[in-house]
Image (cartoon, helix red, strand yellow):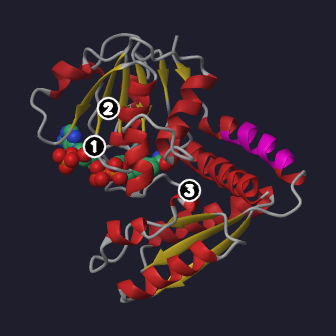
Amino acid sequence: MTTIMDGKKLRDKILSGLKSEIQTFDKKPVLAVILAGDDAASRIYVNNKKKTAENLGIKSIVIEYPADVGENILLEKIEELNLDKEINAILVQLPLPAHIDKQKVIDTIAPIKDVDCFTIENSGRLYTGLEPYVYPCTPQGILYLLDEYKINLEGKHVVVIGRSNLVGKPAAQLALKRNATVTVCHSHTRNLSDITKTADVLISAVGEVLIEDDMMKDDCVVIDVGIFRDCNGKVRGDVNFETVSKKASYITPVPGGVGPMTIASLMVNTVKLYKEQNKRSS
Ligand code: NAP
């Protein structure tokens, strides 16, 4: 029997615990989000994050810039937010306009306020086995789902498709930290299905329909990170849910799987940074 991993239900459970915790705080945690350009999807994501934050008692400040904003303006704003004791967490919504050096902007965020573990210092900590202040939101959300459904990664073969800094690489690293044997695949991987067929846990973060049921063994755990609109405007994941869900032991739907967990992680991370900063200043 296949279990559908319910990201919305788990998000609500995590956020309800977080809301109760926030009610005990003297001050509201504050999340600052920088949004540059006019990407429609980014605007929807940012609005959702703001709404979720405000519902919990986290103050959310969205700082918007036009698509032709100068890089220096963004860098100066981040420096200002770094120094502002009222701001606990900073998120730069990606993608940034093409003329902006994304990594330079991200690396300007003070590591203690880097809510997505994106700066070189925090990702360096992650990849060298040190503990960063928080884990990247989407991969952490995947761990929350695995934990909720009691899926232990130790000794398992975890195949991650995708090697972005946002999802694929940190997901692979977190699986390694849990003593999985990890294979990372990407667009140059040959004979992809020979590899995916050996996966106990398959994590796909690509952005196109790729995973069919003949690419996996029976009872595989399938985590679909991909989310995009197909040519008919329907929201899709990387996995052919209809066929794969008949073969998998556990599977995340799209929407309603990993997506809600990313938002939940962002809120958890904001609170973690708030607590870390309070600890340091007391
Ligand atoms: P990305 O930066 O575009 O990375 C995509 C990865 O897929 C790359 O590593 C690429 O390989 C690999 N790839 C592309 N075509 C492939 C193929 N045919 N076979 C194997 N690998 C292939 O994207 P991303 O930011 O990681 O996001 C991936 C997907 O997850 C997107 O749909 C995005 O919207 C979604 N996402 C969802 C959430 C959520 O909360 N649910 C969060 C973040 C992202 P190369 O490195 O060789 O190019």
Q: Reply above or below: 274 against 237.
A: below
- Contact, mark 2 vs mark 1 (Cβ under 8 Å): yes
Where residue 104 sits in the image (x, y, percent)?
34, 70
The quarter of the displayed image where residue 106 is located: bottom left
Q: Tell me if residue 124 can be seen.
A: yes
In reply to whether residue 220 is colored magenta, the answer given is no
Q: Amino acid at mark 3?
A: Val
Q: Residue at x 43, y 32 (%)?
A: 174
Please, what is the dominant secondary structure of the magenta stretch? helix
Q: Which residue is mark 1?
A: 163
Q: Reply above or below: 109 against 117.
A: below
Q: Mark 2 or mark 3: name the one nearer the start of the chain.
A: 3
Q: Amino acid at mark 2?
A: Val
Question: Between 52 and 280, which is closer to the camera in this rendering?
Answer: 280
Distance of label 3 from label 1 (alpha carbons): 20 Å
Indicate left or right for 137 with 190 as reference.
right
Q: Which residue is mark 3?
A: 115
Distance of label 2 from label 1 (alpha carbons): 8 Å
The quarter of the displayed image where residue 233 is located: bottom left
Q: Which of labels 3 and 1 is toward the front? A: 3
Q: Which residue is mark 2?
A: 160
The magenta segment: 11-21
Indicate left or right for 100 with 61 as reference.
left
Q: Amino acid at mark 1?
A: Arg
Q: Secondary structure at mark 3?
A: loop
Task: Say if disc 1 is inside 8 Å of ligand 1.
Answer: yes
Q: Quadrant of the C terminus?
A: bottom right
